[in-house]
Amino acid sequence: MMYNTCKLSELPLHQTAVVEQMDRRDPVTARLIQLGVINGATVTPLFKSMLGDPVAYQVNDCVIALRRSECSGVTVRTEDDGHAV
């Protein structure tokens, strides 16, 4: 099975992915870990605010809102279904 990777901030709405890697140099990383955004966690962008930022993400069994700048240091992996991410 093939996998694609992208930044969490680039993940299309309603596409589920798995957290692959996090930028440990980013000061927001510690807070994201507290919210459950850890390696192996499943994340799905559910909806965007009217201006497109922040975005509501389902992280495992919880829904959190993250700004694009807060999740740009998170790399996620999606299964390749033949469509570009």
Image: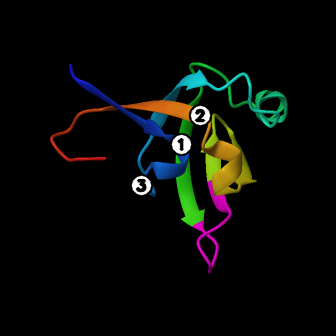
Quarter of the view holding residue 82: top left
Instruction: Reply above or below: 41 against 11.
Output: above
Is residue 23 shown left or right of residue 16?
right
Circle 2 SS class: strand
Tell me how far mark 2 sits from mark 3, CA to CA: 14 Å
Quarter of the view holding residue 16: top left
Q: Position of residue 56 (x, y in %)?
A: 65, 57
Q: Which residue is mark 1?
A: 8
Colouring rule applied to residues: rainbow
Q: Position of residue 78 (x, y in %)?
A: 36, 33
At horizontal 56% and vertical 22% (from top left) the residue drawn is 21
Is residue 33 shown left or right of residue 53?
right
Q: Position of residue 40 (x, y in %)?
A: 56, 19
**Picture disc at residue 12:** 3
At horizontal 60% and vertical 44% (from top left) the residue drawn is 72
- Label located before the other in sequence (2 or 3): 3
Q: Nearest the camera: 42 or 69? A: 69
Circle 1 SS class: helix
At horizontal 19% and vertical 47% (from top left) the residue drawn is 83
Q: Position of residue 30 (x, y in %)?
A: 83, 28
For the magenta stretch, what is the residue range? 48-56
Q: Which residue is mark 2?
A: 74
Instruction: Reply above or below: 30 against 64.
Output: above
User: For the view shown, which residue lies furthest in the front direction?
Assistant: 25
Dot 3 crowding, Cα within 10 Å, few <14, some 14–19, many 20+: some
At horizontal 20% and vertical 38% (from top left) the residue drawn is 81
Tags 1 and 2 touching, CB below 8 Å:
yes
Q: Nearest the camera: 17 or 10? A: 10
- Give the amino acid at mark 1: Leu
Tags 1 and 3 touching, CB below 8 Å:
no
**Picture disc at residue 27:** none
Dot 2 crowding, Cα within 10 Å, few <14, some 14–19, many 20+: many
